[in-house]
Image (cartoon, rainbow, N blue to C red):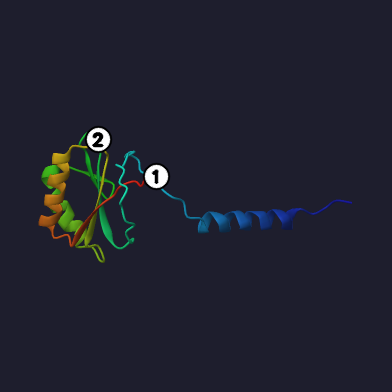
């Protein structure tokens, strides 16, 4: 007696397709950033925000796209005009230059950001 496996294979493939379509994969940052520690940090809500990342070597990324410091304010203006994006999150490596961080904060204010959060790690 031969067992017909066709319905079983069909069901397995349907389950595989279902889980592939409904699974949400977390994307890791392409550039690793080691956030500084802060004992008194607060958890902020995930509202519409524009993320600025500062790498240890001084590279700036706005929502994952590399931007020069001279173009940062214009890039932020464009990003902040998107629907429901009025906040800026600064994600800087603990080895990044403080002066660059001040320039980024300055550009965010000039671009019209309502609020600026600085991301940190809890120890």
At which x and y percent is residue 56?
24, 35
Residue lying at 18% horizontally and 62% vertically, measured from the top left: 114
In this rendering, the label closer to the viewer, 1 or 2: 2
Q: Residue at x 85, y 51 (%)?
A: 2
Label 2 neighbour load within 10 Å: few <14, some 14-19, many 20+: some
Counting from the top left corner in percent of width and height, residue 39 is at 32, 48
Q: Secondary structure at mark 2?
A: loop
Residue 23: x and y in percent read: 51, 55
Disc 1 or 2, which lies upstream in sequence? Answer: 1
Query: In what element is the residue under mark 1?
Result: loop
Q: Are the two marked residues, 1 and 2, in contact with CB atoms closer than 8 angstroms?
A: no
Vertical placement of residue 45 versus 107, above or below = below
Q: Residue at x 72, y 55 (%)?
A: 8
Identity of the residue furthest to the top in this view: 57
User: Can you name the residue that lies furthest to the bottom here?
Assistant: 83
> In the rendered image, which residue does mark 1 sit on?
28
Quadrant showing the C terminus? top left
Q: Quadrant of residue 94?
A: top left
Which of the two residues, 44 or 55, is positioned nearer the viewer here? Answer: 44
Give how far apart the Cα atoms at labels 1 and 2 are. 20 Å
Q: Quadrant of residue 46?
A: bottom left
The furthest residue to the front: 39
| Residue situated in front as seen by the camera: 95 or 39 | 39
Q: Residue 73 location in percent, x, y?
A: 13, 51
Task: Give the crowd class for mark 1: few <14, some 14-19, many >=20 residues within 10 Å.
Answer: few
Check residue 95 in the rendering and tell me which mark sits there, or answer none. 2
């Amino acid at each position: 007696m031969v067992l017909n496996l066709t319905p079983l294979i069909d069901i397995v493939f349907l389950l595989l397709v279902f889980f592939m379509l409904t699974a949400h994969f977390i994307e890791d940052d392409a550039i690793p950033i080691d956030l500084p520690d802060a004992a008194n940090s607060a958890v902020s809500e995930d509202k519409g925000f524009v993320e600025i990342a500062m790498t240890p070597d001084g590279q700036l990324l706005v929502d994952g796209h590399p931007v020069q410091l001279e173009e940062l304010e214009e890039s932020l203006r464009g990003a902040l005009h998107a629907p429901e994006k009025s906040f800026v999150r600064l994600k800087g490596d603990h080895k990044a230059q403080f002066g660059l961080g001040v320039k980024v904060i300055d550009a965010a204010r000039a671009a019209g950001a309502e609020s600026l959060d600085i991301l940190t790690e809890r120890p």
